[in-house]
Image (cartoon, rainbow, N blue to C red):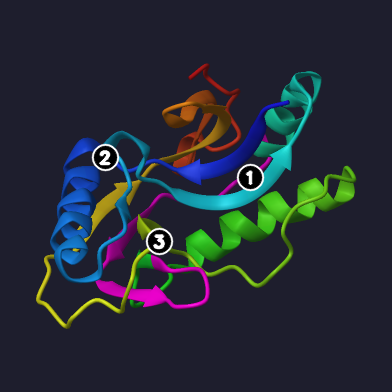
Amino acid sequence: MPRLFFALWPPPHAAKALHAAGRALQKTCGGKLTRRETVHLTLVFLGEVEDDKIPLLASLAAQAQVPAFPLRFDRYGWWKHNRIVWAMPTETPASLAELVQSLEAGLRQEGFVFDRRPYVPHITLLRRARQRPEAVELPAAEWEVGEFVLVKSVQTDEGSVYEVVGRWPLGEEAGSPASPG
């Protein structure tokens, strides 16, 4: 059964900057670098969900009416307990928190099971890092967030393969029907 999650997918320039930051941090902390094409910000991770639930998830997503917003990842660090090196925004935009809360409320109402820990917006750059990254000056990665996506994750011998199965606009177009991945 596929694993599903809602996410923000950075445009190519931001994914490139985040991947470059991960590569620079890898020099001092080791670990496995996240592939550039899979760099993303998870909004809500659902885990294993049957394909026949995707239309319901699409309906819930279309109800999220949040304005577009700028997002800037300018902090880098690590979590020792799970050996993850991450990028985070210094300030979480109110619209990002509102989007996550809207999705979680709809999912709860429909009985979906998901991780209910407090939301900490981060992008995983490295897994299995051996040590904390050294303090280095890295450029920020930023973009204007104009949509969010529903992603299907399938495990293969090469790692996870992600397929966008729906997209929803933010801003004035919010609430529009999903477009296929």
Which residue was labeled with disc 2?
Answer: 36
The numbered dot on residue 110 is none
Q: Secondary structure at mark 1?
A: loop
- C-alpha span from label 3 to label 2: 17 Å
41 or 37: nearer the viewer:
37
Contact, CB < 8 Å: mark 2 with mark 1?
no
Picture layout, residue 103 above or below residue 148: below
Q: Which of marks 3 and 1 precedes in the sequence?
A: 1
Q: Nearer the viewer, mark 2 or mark 1?
A: 2
User: Label 3 crowding class (10 Å Cα cut-off): few <14, some 14-19, many 20+?
Assistant: some
Which residue was labeled with disc 1?
Answer: 64
Which residue was labeled with disc 3?
Answer: 128
* Residue at 18% across, 59% down: 21
* Residue at 12% across, 69% down: 138
Contact, CB < 8 Å: mark 1 with mark 3?
no
Label 2 amino acid? Arg
Picture layout, residue 13 above or below residue 27: above
Q: Which residues are magenta?
A: 62-84
Decide whether residue 63 is among the magenta residues: yes
